[in-house]
Amino acid sequence: MKKLSLMLSATFLALTSFAPAQQPQAQGEQDKLVEIVRNATQKYQDVSNAKGYTAVLGCVSGSDHGAMGVHYVNLNLLGGPIDPTNPQALIYEPQPNGEMKLVGVEFIILASALPANSAPEIEGHLMNYIEYPNRYGLPGPFFELHVWAWKDNPQGPFVDWNNHVTCAHE
């Protein structure tokens, strides 16, 4: 029993000393990228300012939950570079009054634009690899990362699908 008690105490001490050191750093990194994106995309609150960006695919919704919204993509940026102040896509949610509300951005880079076996990241966040063929029609595999800078995502600011976004008003 004494041995079990010592093991539990050691485990508890290890976990409690590890968690505080890790949590603030991860939260700070999340806040940093979200803050950079918000500052860089403030001007796109009005969709008419999204010059160089073109709406593609219509409103993207999940098969079982949430949505992404309408992606306005700057096709000239798909070959890179990845710059946290210049996203490849702006994401808008259609509103009941017909307006478009900026809810987030997506960073996208074609795998062919990177050295083999690359693992691209933005401000310490690894991008997700999407195989080819894919439902988005991009020419080949690509990497992407969503940043929900303008609308809260209950699953986190970097998760693809957002349960607070809807395509109901498209």
Image (cartoon, rainbow, N blue to C red):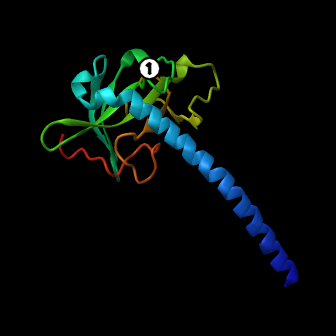
Q: Quadrant of residue 91?
A: top left
What number of labels is visible?
1
Quadrant of res 57? top left
**Which quadrant holds the C terminus?**
top left
Q: Seen in the image, is 14 located left or right of residue 162?
A: right
- Residue 90, how many percent across, how many down? 34, 30
Considering only vertical position in the picture, is 56 above or below 13? above
Dot 1 alpha-carbon crowd within 10 angstroms: few under 14, some 14 to 19, many 20 or more:
many
Do we see residue 134 in this rendering? Answer: no
Residue sitting at the far right: 3
The residue depicted at 70 percent of the width and 63 percent of the height is: 16
Q: Amino acid at mark 1?
A: Leu
Measured as percent of width and height from the top left, residue 59 is found at 26, 37
Q: Which residue is mark 1?
A: 78
Query: Residue 98, image x and y in percent?
Result: 14, 37
Residue 62 in view: yes
Q: Residue furthest bottom?
A: 1
Task: Give the left or right position of residue 72, taking residue 98 as reference.
Answer: right
Kindly state the secondary structure of the residue where label 1 is placed: loop
Residue 9 versus residue 144 in the image, above or below: below
Q: Residue at x 36, y 20 (%)?
A: 74
Most extreme residue toward the top, as rendered?
76
Residue that appears at 31% across and 16% down? 52
Q: Residue at x 56, y 41 (%)?
A: 29
Q: Is residue 155 left or right of residue 163?
A: right
Quadrant that contains the N terminus: bottom right
Please tell me whether residue 57 is drawn above or below residue 20 in the rendered image.
Answer: above
Question: What is the x, y in percent for residue 19?
Answer: 67, 57
